[in-house]
Amino acid sequence: MVRVIGLAGLVMLTAGCAVQTPESRMGAVDSMARSGWAATPQGQAGVDRDWIGRFGDRGLKLLVNEAMNNNRSLQATAARVNRAAAAAKISGAAIRPISNGTLVGRNSEQKFVGFPFGGGQISESYGTSVDVSWELDLWGRVRAGQAADVAEWQAQGLEYNAAQTSLAAQIAKAWFALGETNEQIVLAQSALKIRQNTEEAIRDRFERALLAEGGTASQLRLAQVDVATAKANLAQWQGERESVLRQIELLAGRYPSGSDLSRKGLPALPGYPPAGLPSELLMRRPDVLAAERRFAATGKRIREAELAVFPSLTLNGSLGTSTDSLKNVLDSSFGVWSYGAAVSQPILTGGQLRAEQKARQAGEREALATLQQTVLTAFGEVEQALVAERYLARRAAASEEAVKLAKEAAESAAEDFADGSEDVLTLLLALTRKIDSASALVTLRRLRLDNRINLHLALGGDFKLR
């Protein structure tokens, strides 16, 4: 798996730089949470932490694990986390003294004008020095800037977690789409065989001149249309399967060759996950937590801009040697040293500092609005998934009943047609309903699995690979 600097590294960084991570500002949106979800009476604490494993499909777990290691988009996100970590360390360097070592050697010649035949003097100078400069962060301006960078790092890490979970969900949905196409292809092959057998039966009746009311020739044409439609439907699902196979390979970081990954159908729907409480969601969703960290960073940015108007104190020192002979360059007898201090105070900046404060205050308002919208979106996604879960369950129950009745109707129509007591149109209609209802139920089962993934994501559920 792509290596990302984690919480332990963050602690070491902040401890070494004497910088506190910005305090939580989630209180700004606490009032937006209700006491329970409107779409369900459930209020159980906790959240499913192993939702990928709940589907009971080892092939899915292996693919998710592969994607965590090889997906290029995820690797790019990991690189952004490490870049943010480096930026936080760079901003903290200003708190520490800066030291530079210098070794100088120089030859020079001075020409003398007016002397007979010209002339000049060649001189040599050599020296070493260690120069130290330290800007004392008297007011905490540098520490405020670094704290903001640390919060940005935390936000990037949380977005990496969100990207991991999103990738796992994409893999799972594509895997279930593959399972649906596998089942739909089996149904389409069965439907084609049924249509062909029906066409043969109608053709046999036509050839034996057992004319039914409405004209057997037109009924034969209808049966042939159904056969052609069944062939087109089979080709459609076969094409869908090829497309899904390549989509899965791309997500897993493979070349999209369309290799046959699985012929299995859809898994059974796992148990219903605990919904938890709306207030708990604010501490689980990585996108909400990332938005809060960016809001916290803007507060530190404002503080940094406010402190920029105060004077800064810099200490400087130098220790070394200076000589006209290279062999004495390291001899302390030729040592030189200096030290001093400088105080600088912004006086006339053309309104730059005030404008910077206003810009950062506007950035804070933007970050707060983004956090609030992210929270509302999170609540909305949970409510929508809960509502969809309820109505998809009702549709599934009705669809299962429809499949059962359509199957019985098709069997009865086939028997009546064989006895000559039923016309062809009734048989064709009964077969169509049987095929369509079975296909619709498979699609509905896949939709329920997809919505279950949406619910896990909306609730901030994590996943395990082992």
Image: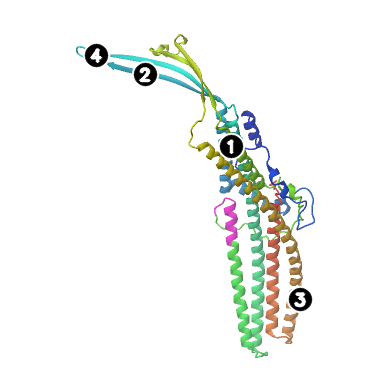
Q: Who comes first in sequence, dot 4 or dot 3? A: 4
Q: Residue 142 in the image: state x and y as whole percent.
A: 57, 31
Labelled disc at residue 408: 3
- Examine the residues drawn in magenta and state their main secondary structure: helix
Q: Which residues are magenta?
A: 242-255
Q: Secondary structure at mark 2?
A: strand
Instruction: Say if mark 4 contacts mark 2, CB within 8 Å.
Output: no
Which is closer to the viewer, label 3 or label 2?
2
Three-letter code for the amino acid on which mark 4 is drawn: Gly
As for residue 249 lying within the magenta part, the answer is yes
Labelled disc at residue 194: none
- Left or right: 125 with respect to 266? left
**Looking at the image, which residue is at 76% across and 65% down?**
394
Three-letter code for the amino acid on which mark 3 is drawn: Glu
Q: Who comes first in sequence, dot 3 or dot 1? A: 1
Labelled disc at residue 119: 4
Labelled disc at residue 106: 2
Q: Is residue 437 visible?
A: yes
Which is closer to the viewer, label 3 or label 1?
1
State the CA–CA distance, disc 1 to disc 2: 42 Å
